[in-house]
Image (spheres, rainbow, N blue to C red):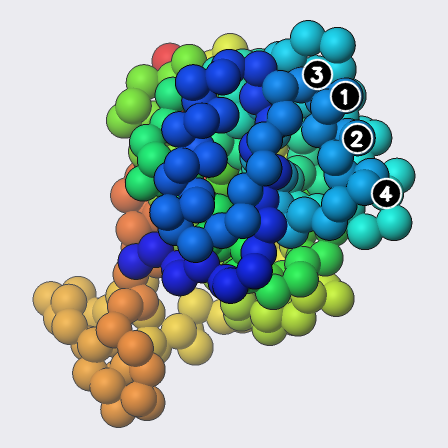
Amino acid sequence: MQPAPAPGKRVLVIDDEESLRDLLQLALREGGYAVETARDGLDGLEQLKSKKFDLVLLDVWMPRMNGLQMLTELQQLPAPPRVIMMTADHTPETLLHTIRESAYQYIGKPFTLESMMELVGKAITCPEQAAIEVLSAKPEWVELLVPCQKEAVDRIESFLMAMKGDLAEEVRYSVGQAFHELLLNAIEWGGKLDPNRKVHIAYLRTKRMILYRIADPGTGFRFQDLTHAAVSNQAGDSLQHVRVRDEKGMRPGGFGILLTRSLVDELIYNQQQNEVMFVKYLQ
């Protein structure tokens, strides 16, 4: 469901393609936002220095000042707005620059108006978020410190999945689902949804495999204590955890770890079980 627009919120669209600027301006105004446009980074930066905007939709490759340069400049403002990057450039260097310079999220071109409006609604209405720290920004070795907030899952996923654009759709899906489940577990159970705590993510890419390592700040767990999860079901009783969840008043679910095991080639926990690593082989 698309979030309802917040009254009075101002959006600046910056893109050198006039037709796209006009299309986004019309859709956003119809959605209840106050909208202005700019044709390049320099034009947009001038507007941001004289007016307050809640959100910027920023293209990457433009004349005079491109979106990456402008994103860096924005961080010097006293109260920089949230930024959604728009681009067909899926190179790791571009994506990692947008993370390092605190872009809120990334959307690849071409996109649908529906997906953009949904993303704008989330960006406008979601709570303030702690910064994502970039520890390593090599395309084949990315390391991040992510705040323990649920909203961070979709943000990080949008960047890292874009880096896998050369992979088969089946592999992209498997890796994406596994990463989503494990990161959400780390943030929700290990980090207790405390934005002051961080999850350490490492992503490694070689010719033959993709490897993720996710370390949360919690004390770990024991599989024998996960009676509410499908991974603990006794042989022949696939609904055992459903009854346990019902007795505890928990929401339906509990298939995360079991699902992840079916999606990847190797899934390994450390002894304390507050760190997990999974591997997907490419050949």
Give residue 254's position: percent from left, percent from top. 31, 67
Judge from the rendering whether residue 115 lies leftward or rightward of residue 123; answer left or right: left
Q: Are marks 1 and 2 in contact (CB under 8 Å)?
A: yes
Which residue occupies 49% across, 51% down? 33
Give the distance between the C-alpha atoms of the residues marked 4 and 3, in whole angstroms.
Answer: 17 Å
Asked which secondary structure carries label 3, the reply is loop
Task: Write down the quadrant of residue 130 in the picture.
Answer: bottom right
Residue, disc 3:
66
Front residue of 57 and 227? 57
Give residue 243's position: percent from left, percent from top. 20, 83
Asked which secondary structure carries label 1, the reply is helix
Residue 42, labelled with which disc?
1
Count of marks placed on residues: 4
User: Which amino acid, by three-letter code, is at mark 2?
Assistant: Glu
Residue, disc 4:
77
User: Which amino acid, by three-letter code, is at mark 4?
Assistant: Leu
Residue 46, labelled with which disc?
2
Residue 152, labelled with which disc?
none
User: Which amino acid, by three-letter code, is at mark 1?
Assistant: Leu
